[in-house]
Amino acid sequence: MPEIKVTPLGAGQDVGRSCILVSIAGKNVMLDCGMHMGYNDDRRFPDFSYITQNGRLTDFLDCVIISHFHLDHCGALPYFSEMVGYDGPIYMTHPTKAICPILLEDYRKITVDKKGETNFFTSQMIKDCMKKVVAVHLHQTVQVDEELEIKAYYAGHVLGAAMFQIKVGCESVVYTGDYNMTPDRHLGAAWIDKCRPDLLISESTYATTIRDSKRCRERDFLKKVHETVERGGKVLIPVFALGRAQELCILLETFWERMNLKAPIYFSTGLTEKANHYYKLFITWTNQKIRKTFVQRNMFEFKHIKAFDRAFADNPGPMVVFATPGMLHAGQSLQIFRKWAGNEKNMVIMPGYCVQGTVGHKILSGQRKLEMEGRQILEVKMQVEYMSFSAHADAKGIMQLIRQAEPRNVLLVHGEAKKMEFLKQKIEQEFHVNCYMPANGETTTIFTNPSIPVDISLGLLKREAAIGPVPDAKKPKLMHGTLLMKDNSFRLVSPEQALKELGLAEHQLRFTCRVHIQDPRKEHETVLRVYNHLKGVLKDYSVQHLPDGSITVESILIQATAHSEDQGTKVLLVSWTYQDEELGSYLTSLLKKGLPQSTA
Amino acid sequence: YRELHTFELQAPTRLIEWAHGSRVCVAGYGQSGGNEILQLIPPPRLQAKETQGLCPERDFKVECGGFSKHPVYRLKHVPDTSLLVTSGPPDSSVQVWQVSAEDSDVIKSVGTIVTENSTGQPWAKIATISARVPWVLHGSTLDSIQITEVELRKNVYTAASEDSDELSGLAFLDSSTVLLCCARGRLCMADVRQPQRPTQAVPVPAVPHAERWCMGTLCAAQGSDMGSQPVARLSSRGFITLTDLRKASEPLALAQARVPSPGSGAEFLCVSWAPALQGCLAISGFDGTVHVYDTHSWDSSGREAEPTFVHKGHMLGGAGGSGDPPLVTAHTWHLQKPRTVLSAASDGSLHVWDWVQP
């Protein structure tokens, strides 16, 4: 049975890093190559030795696909391609290709320069890695080789995020990466056509969550920012350069405009320009509204948001600052945090998930005394808030996507196994498909039922159509023919044509059986008796008495001779072809029973 | 509002019930099967006594779920057990479910309490009591009231009555007395230690038109005086009566709520007392709003009362003109936070709101 094998090397049943191996029809594809942000040692990278113990990765893998630029999906890519070794193609969308190296370089700087780590990739490695990248457009079918093709679909979530369809022959797998089924201020919702893949691999981080409506969350966020600024406090919002930051910028800009607020809003330099540049460049990746208003004014050119300078952090008075990186683990946002933490009028709002080990995670867990470098204790008096604006699909969204794509099997990654039983049953009940949830390192095998297209010859069709009534178009019709497999093509032809094409001679198989009958009369009288008997019994068949003294029943021949040694016994020779086996053996057993006594 | 959270359930619910460990249960009531029973963990924000700044999550988490072929109209958690009971069309039987949140997240069906002549009967109303005994009181008409011990599914009490009045609600006043509300308005009581006919406690209020009634009582807390909390009755035209069961002959107070004239019938009528706010009750089921009233100022004149607060959120969230405007199907009070209410509507929305005293 043909099968598709899936092995998560990360994001089997944990959030942190995504790296999934898929084996389909002899092709091996790696989906995403993420890094776990919570570990500082080798555990942050996926375990690539699982793939092949001593073989070369380039020989084993046909391609690598990266879904979007978040580090938990692409963070380990330079390590993988340059330090472990892979020279094959790496596919991602254009925005991802543009933005990935920036985030990787940022992260590298913090990890190596600030923290002094050694086993990490270098800037040159990032550059070399990106040289292996082939950028793809949405809905463009890309031939990786003669048999393997891939296609990207819009996934929402962040700029450039895509879901990928991987197809070999008529078997296909769709990998969603992270996606979002509801549009937001700067991105549209994920969409896929009814491609009916054999397997859909979907993330399920938020599958068991019923999310608070966006309006309420935004209202709360704005209320908090407003309150802090009104009382003269400073608001720090640590963000990653690209992603939710743009969403929040648009939100604040609109609010500031509406409420006519004067407090300054700052965005870390360098990243504003780049972000702006990329959103302008990839305008087709944003949502309808942005594209429409872009003509009038650039939504990413903000009136109230200005570039930040380190010195501003010491300015008196209220302000709002967006600074990187997002988990407060290093860099500018951490510097600003240290300056402002001691004042209870200030507030820090964490807009996303913080991995364990980071300062962001610590303060969200309630820690108020943090140990900094040089054993300094930092007391946190400022207010700490968490507002998750990350865009992931919830249970309803997952069901929507399955409904759109109509896969035959579903595989869930990124969730916790125990809590997924209900969702698994829900999917199985509603869509009647199998649902799998492998753990890291566990291989799931999915059996597929590919349909094999076969050409049928016109002659065979005509012949089969001539037999019997016109078949019902909806019902399958049973046909007989010979399957010729030549040069990767399958053809169904009549046996005669097959023999001719292959240059084979047809052999006829004929059986002959002897039946002894006690009859002292002359041969031709015996024959007459047999003829009359058969005629009476086999009313539905054509029984003929030929001038040469033989009897035919359909195509079976019966001849009578006298037994060489015993004149009282006649020997009937019953002969039939292989095709008439059934009738032949029936006749034989009938004759063996003997002839009735009184016949004319 | 002090706090407002709006959520969207995949399917609308007509019940919101508290379960052990401050969990909230909701369930679908669709006719075509595949209804989900969900036990949700409310966001940490709502669990805390005061609104702390440090509550990361604002979302409900589905702790476990189960599937029901039939629409679920009522659900009650059986205290001190890990069982739930549900009821709904097409008959008056009661389904029993097991919740085992540690092992798996599926709510399993473990049995049914079948009642005699259950087919063709209207669906059963149910009530449970927080006492040592896992009893469930259920029935759809006055003559079909029973108490069943849930774990062994053994019948403990059957009311001996010939009255086939339809019930709209029932409740335990304490472990030996039950209160029954007929759909036509009268209240009856019965002592469950003896199988006798329930006695009429309070007659149908004198109103010009025949209306449907439902009641609201405060959960029988341990050791509290049985009659200390008045029983509220709400009619399909918005008339509210308050009765002290110790002096059942005279109503304590009467009031008329300003509600639109009955349109879709009294399917979702709901009246409930605030557990942490003396004399405060809420009504819903007439349209997309929930009204909160302070009954301290009410008298027996039956005039129109001003609501302290009206939650209109469900009306605003409608799916833009497609079909009927949403109707509030259920509401319930938060057990600890005094002014927090949860309400659900027919468009699948679930709101949690905390209003500011004007």
Image (spheres, coloured by chain):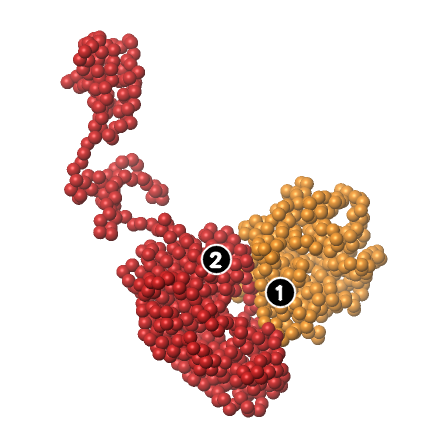
Chain colours: A red, B orange
The residue that appears at 74% across and 45% down in the rendered structure is B156
User: Residue B121 versus residue A493: which sits nearer the camera?
Assistant: A493
Q: Name the kind of residue labelled 2 in the image.
A: Met
Judging by the rendered image, the residue that carries numbered circle 2 is A437
Camera-side residue of B297 and A490 = A490
* Left or right: where B230 falls relative to A480: right
Give A106 or A182, whichever is nearer the viewer: A106
Please check whether the numbered discs 2 and 1 fall on a single chain: no
Residue A105, visible in the rendered structure: yes
Q: Quadrant of the C terminus of chain A?
A: top left
Residue B42: assigned label: 1
Rendered residue at 25%/30% (across/down): A579
Place residue A388 in its image quadrant. bottom right
Note whether B235 is above or below B57 in the view shown.
Answer: above
Asked which secondary structure carries label 2, the reply is: loop
Q: Position of residue A41 (x, y in %)?
A: 47, 72
In this rendering, the answer to whether A413 lies above or below A379 is above
| Distance from the alpha carbon under mark 2 to that under mark 1 | 26 Å
Number of callouts in the render?
2
Q: Nearer the viewer, residue A444 or A212?
A: A444
Q: Residue flagged by tag 1: what amino acid is it?
A: Pro
Q: Is residue A561 left or right of residue A201?
A: left
**Please, is residue A104 above or below residue B40 in the view?**
below
